[in-house]
Structures are given as C-alpha cells and as structure tokens.
Image: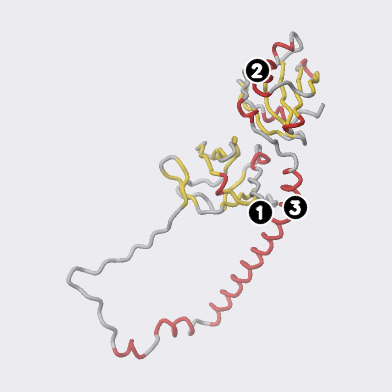
Amino acid sequence: MSSPVIPPPLEALRNRPFSFYPAILNIERNKWQYRKATWTDVLVVNARTGLEIWIPRRFLGEISSIEDPVVIVGLLKELEYREGAVWPYQRRVIEMPIAVGASAPPPSPAQRASPAPVVGIRLESDTEWHLFRIVGGALVLGVVAAYFAVNFYRDSVLRPRSAYMAKDRTYLTLTARDDYDAVVRKLGAPAHDRWRLAAGGTRYRALSYPDQAYTIVLMAPDGKDAGRNATYIGALDANWNPLHAAKLSTGDAGALLSGLPRF
C-alpha cells in the first residue's frame, strides 16, 4: 500500500506572498498570503483585494523552491471562483446550431478531390515550423527543470519536516483566552513546564508534549502574577516551527512565535 500524500507545507509561507499556477479564474490579482489551515482546507487571502477563500488541500500541488519573482504554489486542477468558493473549472464546447430547415452543404468536387486540411498543415512555411520547434524545446526544458526542482524540494524540505509532524491537532481547539488550567483540561498535563523571561518583562511558558510532538506556548505580558496572567499564544512542532498561532488583540501571534528562541 502506498503512503498517503503529505499536504504541502503552506504554513512555511505565513509571511511570504505567493502565486497559484494556474491562476484561479474570475480573480484579477494572483498574489496571495497564507492565513490559516485545517486538516482538509487552507485559508488564503488576496494580498491586493483582501478576498479570503478556502482551498481544499486535495487541489494543492508542489511549492517551487525558486522565489524569482515570487513563490509559485502549483494547483492540481484549474480552479474558478464563483458563489463565494472555488470549484474545478470545466471547459464547455458549444456547437453552433444549423438553421431550421437547412442542411449542411455537400462538399464540392474540388473539395472532395483534395485533402485541404492536411495540405494546409504540411505547407506551412519553414519560419513557422522553426518557431514551433524553438517554443516546443523551451517548454520541454522548462518541464525537466521543474521536475528536478520539485524532487529536490521534496527530498530536502518535505521529508525532513514530515518526521516532526504533530501526531494530533487537539491544539487547534485552544484560543487566546485559555490559561494553564484550560490547556491541561483540553490536552492533559505536560511532560515539561518551563519559563523564560524576555526583554521588557514579558514572560513565556512552554508546556511540552513529547508524545504529541508539539509544545504549547503561553505568554504573560508582564512579570507580575505571571502564573495567572499567562495565556495561550500558539503551538510549536519538534523543530520549534509554528504549528498554530492564536488571534490576539494586537494581531496574529505568528510573528512572536517565529522570533521566540528555543528554551
């Protein structure tokens, strides 16, 4: 039995803009930012218009390792935006109807005698054929380069990170209102509990859950009565990379988690 496909790690693009390829139809600006994700869907926001849409993970492909001019996130199907959601785009072929009472005109003797469509293709000029060969060769080289880039990215980034993927996602139920007691009620007692004092008097509390492969982080804005004031700001994986960030009154806690040293 083949192993399940690992969902693309769009969480790594939290503070970096990216574009979809192919672009989502019916949306003018193809520049997006990662907002949040569930196990089945990813929420992205248009960097120009502020439009938020959910993309099913089954439509997401590989992420390019080249950022010039912007990171590219591949889509496995061509999508279109309608009725407030994205759907697989289906191209429709419309056949022009024949007028009532009319029939298709029979081919003339000259048309029956000469294979006009085939002759038209064979008699193209040498210049057009040469241009076609150049364009075709460039497309082949691009596909080969993309293949090697995707395989390099999968081997060097996706596989090492997958070993540290959290074993459960119960931490997604936590909010910025949850203190230590609330975390213990939802997740159980941590294996390790430690504090760190940062500049300005802010204190951080790390609750480690090795069996689940993540660490819960609480924050107290000041050092006074920190045990009661510390509340949930997010979860980190075994590599100390953000898995989830709470919504704070001052904004998303993702920046705090990204700059927090391991302790």
Q: In this view, does 112 lie above or below 251?
A: below
Task: Tell me which label, 3 or 1, sits earlier in the chain.
Answer: 1
Mark 1 or mark 2: name the one nearer the start of the chain: 1
What mark, if any, has residue 122 been given in the picture?
Answer: none
Lower position in the chain sequence, tag 3 or tag 2:
3
Say how the picture is coloured: secondary structure
Cβ–Cβ under 8 Å for marks 1 and 2? no
The Cα–Cα distance between marks 1 and 2, rounded to whole angstroms, is: 39 Å
Between tags 3 and 2, which lies in front?
Answer: 2
**Amino acid type assigned to the residue bearing label 1 in the image:** Ser
Give me the C-alpha separation between circle 3 and circle 1.
Answer: 17 Å
Residue type, mark 2 in image: Ala
Q: Is residue 42 above or below residue 76?
A: above
Q: Nearer the viewer, residue 1 or 125?
A: 1
Provide the residue designation for mark 3. 155
In the rendered image, which quarter contains the C terminus? Answer: top right
* Residue at disc 2, secondary structure: helix
The residue depicted at 61 percent of the width and 45 percent of the height is 18
Q: In the image shown, does 2 or 130 lie closer to the viewer?
A: 2
